[in-house]
């Protein structure tokens, strides 16, 4: 487990055996990982494929070797533009136009997320804290189906467990309360990239049932 993930899992700083420089913070260690979300893709004749991405974690640099899980290929941006300016890096929270050569528009469409290979594990189950609004249109129930909105798309899930704010097992959610849920991704979307603190929306159709964030993703599968 990476250093910051280990700390976030509940261990105390005093019990650590890692040696780090004094100026290095927990956030900085965690955000060394790079995660990008695709927004749009288009082709410029004579130049190459441009992918518009948001930097969710870390810093993207020209010549970083990125992994496109959808196509199982590694690609490198040869140019970056942020706010209509040519730059050598794009930071967390920024939207960047990244130029790629040697790939097709079709290869770079609908990949959802991109990262540096082996920096993340893909998961098929995860736990999250959720807040159910007072005007929630429906309940979540154990064994029930829902969608989790991530990376600009809905991923189908099954609700495996629900715990209330006191940690008691319950069978369904109620409006206005906070819960911890565990979900399993449907076979149509067998794995996904997640990180601790990632914001999620739990939905049914186009209706939001709850909002929250990822706590852990312990059921890790291989990328084979």
Image (cartoon, helix red, strand yellow):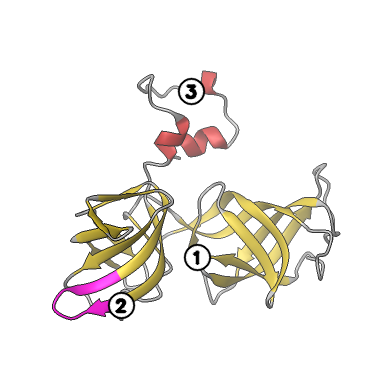
Residue behind mark 3: 16
Other residues around mark 2 within 10 Å, as few (<14) / some (14–19) / many (≥20) = some
Vertically, is 57 above or below 125?
A: above
State which tag comes first along the sequence, 2 or 3.
3
Q: Place residue 102 in its image quadrant.
A: bottom left
Q: Residue at x 40, y 35 (%)?
A: 29
Disc number lying in front (2 or 1) = 2
* Mark 3: secondary structure: loop
Locate residue 24, reporting x and y percent.
38, 26
Tell me where residue 88 appears, x and y as whole percent.
22, 50
Q: Determine which residue is flagged by label 1.
A: 151
Report the Cα–Cα distance between label 1 and label 3.
34 Å
- Give the magenta part as a residue range: 42-50
Compared across the picture, whether 16 is left or right of 46 comes to right
- Which residue was labeled with disc 2? 42
Residue 115 drawn in magenta: no
Image quarter for residue 39?
A: bottom left
Furthest toward the left, the residue is 46
In the image, residue 113 above or below residue 180: below
Instruction: Indicate the position of residue 187 as horizontal and vertical percent values.
Output: 56, 74
């Amino acid at each position: 487990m990476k250093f910051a993930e280990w700390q976030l899992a509940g261990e105390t700083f005093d019990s650590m055996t890692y040696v780090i420089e004094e100026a290095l913070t927990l956030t900085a260690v965690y955000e060394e990982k790079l995660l990008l979300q695709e927004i749009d893709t288009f082709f410029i004749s004579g130049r190459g494929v441009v992918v518009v991405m948001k930097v969710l974690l870390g810093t993207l640099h020209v010549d970083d070797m990125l992994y496109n899980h959808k196509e199982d290929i590694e690609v490198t941006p040869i140019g970056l533009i942020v706010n209509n300016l040519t730059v050598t890096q794009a930071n967390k929270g920024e939207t960047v136009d990244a130029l790629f050569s040697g790939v097709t528009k079709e290869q770079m469409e609908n990949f959802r997320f991109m990262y540096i290979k082996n920096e993340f594990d893909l998961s098929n189950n995860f736990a999250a804290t959720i807040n159910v609004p007072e005007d929630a249109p429906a309940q979540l129930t154990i064994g029930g189906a829902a969608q989790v909105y991530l990376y600009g798309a809905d991923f189908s899930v099954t609700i495996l467990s629900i715990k209330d704010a006191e940690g008691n097992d319950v069978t369904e959610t109620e409006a206005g309360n906070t819960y911890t849920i565990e979900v399993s991704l449907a076979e149509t979307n067998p794995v996904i990239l997640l990180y601790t603190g990632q914001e999620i929306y739990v939905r049914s159709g186009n209706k939001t049932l709850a909002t929250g964030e990822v706590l852990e993703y312990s059921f890790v599968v291989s990328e084979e």
